[in-house]
Image (tube, rainbow, N blue to C red):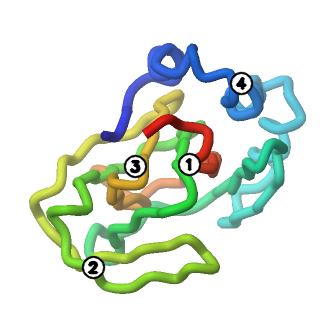
Amino acid sequence: MAVIGNYFEVKKFFKNNDKLGVVFDYLEEALDPTSQVHQRMFSSIEPRAQKIDIGGGCFVVEQVYMTKDRADCFFESHKKYVDFQLILSGNEQMEVIDIRHLTFKSFEEDKDFIAYEDTDKASKIVMQPEDLSVYFTNDAHLGLSSFESKQLVYKAVVKVPVAFFDF
């Protein structure tokens, strides 16, 4: 069950989970133009992905990239981590579908990465600045896709161990 919406509204869904303090502390810094996190992320317009440990078993992948044609994107999910994906700048079309509706393609255990065959039956949403999407283990998601035109996106993807949640 993915949770998707404005950061400040989505955060309310997790207010009773004390384990997520490190996650929301990082995301607040990413949103704050005066913080070192925000300034580091916006220090380059060159595409890049930087992995940073934020503590508590969580890490973030700070990303700068150009969106792609839909045909060049793919569905993925994870077994060990829940994705908290925050858009800081730019727009991206995301797609999400329950993994039970997909055909398994491959699994890379060391990367906690499950790939699936493509489908046109997924729900689509346009992610904009300050939008946060949370993808659980049953949520296959497709990102990096252009909405209307290719554009530069700044995004933080926080990887949170599934042990942080009661399901």
Q: Which residue is mark 4?
A: 28
Tell which tag, 4 or 2, sits nearer the viewer: 2
Mark 4 or 1: in front is: 1
* Residue ID for mark 2: 104
Local SS, label 2: strand
Tell me if residue 88 comes above or below residue 130 in the rendering.
Answer: below
Give the residue at mark 1: 162
Task: State how far apart marks 4 and 2 are (Cα).
Answer: 35 Å
Residue 141: image location, x then y, percent: 35, 57
Q: Label 3 is placed on what type of residue?
A: Glu
In the displayed structure, 14 sits above or below 20; it is above
Q: CA distance from mark 4 to mark 1?
A: 21 Å
Single out the mark in the foreground, 2 or 3. 2
Q: What is the x, y in percent for residue 163?
A: 60, 45
SS for dot 4? helix
> In front here: 164 or 97?
164
